[in-house]
Image (spheres, grey):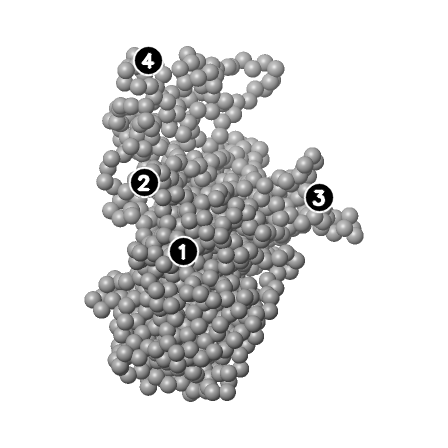
Amino acid sequence: MSLQQRIILTVLVLAGNTAFGALWLGAPERPVQESPQLEKLGDCLPSNSDKDLNINNVRAKILGGGDMWWDGVNDAQYEVPKIDPSSGQTPVNAIFAGALWFSALDDAGQLKVAAQTYRNQGHDFWTGPLRPDGEIDKSTCAAWDNHFEVLGEDIDNFLLAFQEAGGVSLAESQIPTSVKNWPGRGNPLVASELYYNDGPLAPFFDLDDNGIYDPRKGDYPVIGVKDDNGNVVPNYADQMIFWVMNDKGNIHGRTGGQALGVQVNAIAFAFQTNDEVNNMTFYSFDIVKKTPGSLNETYMGVFCDPDLGDFEDDWIGCDTSRALGFVYNSQASDDQYGTPPPVLGIDYFEGPLDDNGNELGMSSFVYFNNAASGPQTDPDNAAQFRNFQTGLWKDGTPITEDGTGYGGTVPTNYVYPSNPSDPAGWSECSESIPGDDRRFVQNSGPFTLQNGEFQKITIGAIWVKPDNYGLCPDIEAIIGRADDRAQFLFDNNFDKLDGPDAPDLNVRELDEEFIFTLTYAQNSNNFGENYAENVPGSSGFDDSTYKFQGYLIYQLADATVTAQELSDASRARLLYQCDIKDDIVDIYNYEPLTANGQTIYSPVLKVTGSNEGIERSLQATTDLFAIGDNKLVNHKDYYYMALAYGYNNFYPYVVGDTSSVVPQYEPYILGQGNIKQYTCTPHRSNPGLGGTELNAVYGQGLPVTRVEGQGNGGNAIEITAASEEEILNSFTSYVDDITYKGNRTPIGVRVVDPFALQDVDFELRILPSTNPANVFPAGATWELTVSRDGVVETTIQSERTLDRPFDQIIPEYGIALKLGNPLPVNTNRNNNEDVYGYLNSSIEFADDDQQWLTFITDGSNGGDESPSNWLRSGQFKLFESEYALRRVYDDQYYPTAPAFTNAAQPPSETFFYDAQGEFNNILGGQWAP
């Protein structure tokens, strides 16, 4: 934003020590000039380095001088939602600036302070690690004036390369640059006189546990969290940025305080997801003392200057149960964010430990205003920073309950701790205080820090845009669920539930048409649709993993749509859905609703499965957003997004269940990885020649000749008339080679990209080659040999075993193969044998006008209790009191199943013969097994 000029008066303040301070006179916003005073007196120069944390829907600028979320000069840089800079849109920011605050007393009782707000007032932090003696020089500060960035994708590629190289060592040339240059302790690939690594720096997973970071031996960057045994957890984010700071590089120009002699190892990180985490960023700060003596009564804090769009209408508050500070709008609309305005929170996930080893958490939450003077305005010197950190006002007056928190009678450490929706609570809304430009600090302390000791804080910034917003909003309802997601991440060592990676969406652009195929890179967690991930809370259950279930492809309204907006029909519309053919169709998650202090769980439909099996290619010819004629238009851009989802229901949630077991509230999981937006433009293939003439079309089946083997591969099969004639004319009624019609083959081969077809021969072999059973054995795979003019060109391996039907795209040759053991649709509970569905059904007459054979059609559409409802397929069941009618109308179920006791008990409690109605539509419901 454009800032008005501000008058700065430098004065000498006596407040326990002598310090330079800044007094603000009447200007509404921030400073715009850099003070030269440190360059005259210091050794290290202020940091110039910056890096954007921008992997998800946030663009947050990280600086190297103890500050972040602004450009270090004049402008806010915490942009959410993130926009494309080339779009011409005006970005909106939720935070103007943020910084670290530290204060303590030395063994002689002298105050030590290092804190930052705005750079024109001076600097308290510089880049680089301190030497063991607690000192640093200008050249070392300059060498470390850098931010070290690594992407999760880089680590994925590194781990794949390391595995393919044998898992022992990897050549330096094969290591991604970001992984190679990560400044872990002792990294031999970047070590130099100035770039020394003699102490803990950037966190890493130490594969050989020798304490030295060497990616050639399999070490790689991680977030740095530790398990209960103190071991580094091998978890990493989609983007991580590391930098190192100290407060000894020069005199403290911002606070005028004496240096603590600390080094701060900082890491900022974020995850790209399709849920609330996509609007979050996370930060972890390790502080280590490297000077003699103790730091006593030490406090660590995070300063935040939120500007939720318009900076003059903000309210702030905190939730002490969550250690959450938040900012919200004092009006129902914001000049920049519009209606409804968002809410932003800073969650204090982890604080330092007290002298007894207990985590301190958020010990105080205080605020101050952007105003000219007064006890509730910006601190000017070290003593005033210390007051704010210890839960006092700038002038040392205790914070008190009610009003603005100043001048009352009941002391407290937390301002505005109530939900604004509570009229009896203490909030800015309940007090009717005018919105303004607020700043707040979340502190943690006191604790003692000895020479060589580490302490740590971890925070997260959470942004939520609610569906509606009233005055005195319910902050818990708006941000509580998102904060729960963030807390879950932290509690699980940032081991994010990934879900199955989205497939790569490959497009063939044709005349008013697209052909899409879905493929995976080998290092994807869903390569071969083999995604599996442990479900939190499922320990001890047989079914304890999420597994891949299906695909979703959306057409997007424009290039700005994100994965979080896919449920908004004005922004995205479902083009295609497919899923494994099994007994899983509609999937619900159960979301908590809190009212009057009680939590209930409400079902939310996440997906309606077609339950027709997976097919990883499709043809698109219509524009889902068109009005009138919906044909795709040549030379117009269209936008698409593909996703994958998984399923697990280890303990189904049932309303009213009084069991002590925590059920599965989230059977559905949508994948987070590899989510991309695809821009596609239909056009003629060769306009100058009127287009390219093709000899095949999408979906066309290719004939297949069986040389050896038996069975149908789980597909409907039909031999050619020539093979049929050859068999009939054979003396033995047997021939060696049988040819199947296209689209009626045991291997389900078809054309998915006519342009990629080549004049080659294919030979498919099932491995192992001998099997006396009627199904593919466990672990069976296939290999496809490709020959050109009799010479083998390549061999392609199957991506998964033949445990179920699997549709494998072979993009380089424009074909797909689909084969595998069919999945059972039910289990016969009398003998525990699997029950399988049918492939297809049809009846043909020589003369359709004289159909001499007919059946009685099932009349289920007349109602479950209709006399014509003769097929006992489905899951209809009357109640115990209607025993006589049950024998007539109940769908077939097993007598060992639980009986109905009340109307709330769902049919899923009964084991039906054919719960999904698999056999309900054979010949249109005229026939049943």
Q: Is residue 586 above or below residue 330?
A: above
Q: Is residue 721 above or below residue 469?
A: above
Q: Earlier in the sequence, mark 2 or mark 3?
A: 2
Q: Earlier in the sequence, mark 2 or mark 4?
A: 2
Residue 597's tag is 2
| Residue bearing mark 4 | 885
Q: Nearer the viewer, mark 2 or mark 3?
A: 2
Q: Earlier in the sequence, mark 1 or mark 2?
A: 1
| Residue bearing mark 1 | 404
Image mark count? 4
- The residues tagged by marks 4 and 1 sit, at their Cα atoms, a distance apart of 70 Å
Q: Secondary structure at mark 2?
A: loop
Q: Earlier in the sequence, mark 3 or mark 1?
A: 1
Q: Nearer the viewer, mark 3 or mark 1?
A: 1
- The residues tagged by marks 3 and 4 sit, at their Cα atoms, a distance apart of 58 Å
Give the percent coordinates (x, y) of residue 915: 37, 28
Q: Secondary structure at mark 3?
A: loop
Q: Which residue is depicted at the point 42% across and 14% down?
A: 866
Q: Which residue is depicted at the point 70% across and 48% down?
A: 636
Inspect the image, locate mark 1, and give the three-letter code of the amino acid beneath it.
Thr
Tell me where residue 99 sits by quadrant. Answer: bottom left
Q: Earlier in the sequence, mark 4 or mark 1?
A: 1
2 and 4 marks in contact (CB < 8 Å): no
Inspect the image, locate mark 4, and give the three-letter code of the amino acid beneath it.
Leu
Tell me where residue 445 sits by quadrant. Answer: bottom left
